[in-house]
Image (cartoon, rainbow, N blue to C red):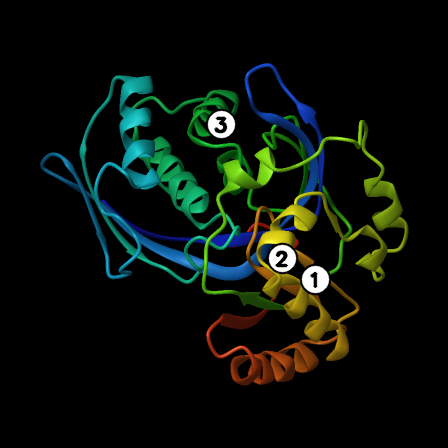
């Protein structure tokens, strides 16, 4: 059986880091929104083995890739095995803090669970996804969600707008482990409430906050420059997503966002730039 699956990237409309756990992970509160940039995966069975194909020069096609690890984890968990071939076409930029690798892993888990003689329960599939990375369960859901715990405890969110975005990714990557390790934990508790946004979903600017941004920006000042440029060009708010380095600006219309994205490709020629929007429903 052959299937074609698309999975979106994501932004964090806010990211509060609440504390460090004994296991080394951090407790967070974050609103994760899918965005209309889709990795495309062609998946089909083969006689044996796992074969991954991807033309992107920065994407490994061996056991280092989360796709490969997701398939192996599923086979171990279920005791069922088949050969798997995956052809991956990337639209979500690599190393952007937008969850592309996690999204691809979630797509493979969903496909294998549909193919397996005995499918895992929703809870078991979620736990398997969690074992691969804190963001992977979100991409099984593929809709706006308030994420707590280490980012794996998900509460679906309804009633949001589709926010037009301009995304700008500088030409470097940020280590998530370094970003979290550089944070001085002083917050103690969550200050941003989902009810605040839902009461006025057309005005998200007051909720834009990322506890990792100051530490990352101190090391990479281009992030501050990009945020300022987006605001000067009409963004109602701008923020670094996740552990970076991608910065998003929220605009009132897609036409405005598209025009600013064209200008961004000239102003920030070394960066990856795109206009897109957030998604409110699962999309495939």
Quarter of the image for the N terminus: give it.
top left
Q: What separation in Å lies between label 3 and label 1 (alpha carbons)?
A: 27 Å
The residue carrying mark 3 is: 130
Q: Is residue 130 above or below residue 211?
A: above
Q: Answer whether labels 3 and 1 touch (C-beta < 8 Å).
A: no
Q: Answer whether labels 1 and 2 touch (C-beta < 8 Å).
A: yes
Looking at the image, is mark 2 or mark 3 nearer the viewer?
Answer: 3
Residue at 27% x, 24% y is 75
Label annotation for residue 82 = none
Whole-percent x, y for residue 185 in the image: 72, 31
The residue carrying mark 1 is: 162
Q: Is residue 251 above or below residue 23?
A: below
Whole-percent x, y for residue 50 in the image: 18, 38
Whole-percent x, y for residue 158 in the image: 74, 46
Residue at 11% x, 34% y is 48
Q: What separation in Å lies between label 2 and label 3 (alpha carbons)?
A: 23 Å
For marks 3 and 1 on the same chain, the one whose residue lies earlier in the sequence: 3
For marks 2 and 3 on the same chain, the one whose residue lies earlier in the sequence: 3
The local secondary structure at tag 1 comes to: loop
| Left or right: 84 as drawn, with respect to 28 | left
**For residue 191, what is the image quadrant?**
top right
The residue carrying mark 2 is: 279
The local secondary structure at tag 3 comes to: helix
Query: In this view of the protein, can residue 157 be seen by the observer?
Result: yes
């Amino acid at each position: 059986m052959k299937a074609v699956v698309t999975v979106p990237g994501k932004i964090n409309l806010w990211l509060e880091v609440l504390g460090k756990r004994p296991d080394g992970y951090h407790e967070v509160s974050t609103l994760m929104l899918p965005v209309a940039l889709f990795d495309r995966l062609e998946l089909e069975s083969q006689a044996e083995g796992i074969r991954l194909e991807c033309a992107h020069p920065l994407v490994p096609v061996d056991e280092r890739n989360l796709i490969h690890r997701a398939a192996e984890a599923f086979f171990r968990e279920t005791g069922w095995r088949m050969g798997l071939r995956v052809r991956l076409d990337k639209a979500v930029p690599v190393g952007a803090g937008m969850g592309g690798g996690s999204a691809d892993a979630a797509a493979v888990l969903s496909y294998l669970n549909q193919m397996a003689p005995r499918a895992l329960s929703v809870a078991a599939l979620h736990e398997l996804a969690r074992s691969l990375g804190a963001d992977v369960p979100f991409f099984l859901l593929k809709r706006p969600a308030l994420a707590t715990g280490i980012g794996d405890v998900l509460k679906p969110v309804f009633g949001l707008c589709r926010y037009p975005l301009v995304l700008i990714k500088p030409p470097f990557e940020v280590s998530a482990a370094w970003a979290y390790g550089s944070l001085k934990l002083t917050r103690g508790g969550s200050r941003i409430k989902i009810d605040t946004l839902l009461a006025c979903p057309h005005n998200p600017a007051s909720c834009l906050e990322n506890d990792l941004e100051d530490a990352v920006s101190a090391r990479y000042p281009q992030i501050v420059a990009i945020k300022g440029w987006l605001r000067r060009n009409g963004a109602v708010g701008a923020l670094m997503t996740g552990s970076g380095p991608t910065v998003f600006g929220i605009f009132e219309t897609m036409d405005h966002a598209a025009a600013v994205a064209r200008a961004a490709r000239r102003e920030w020629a070394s960066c990856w730039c795109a206009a897109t929007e957030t998604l409110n429903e699962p999309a495939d």
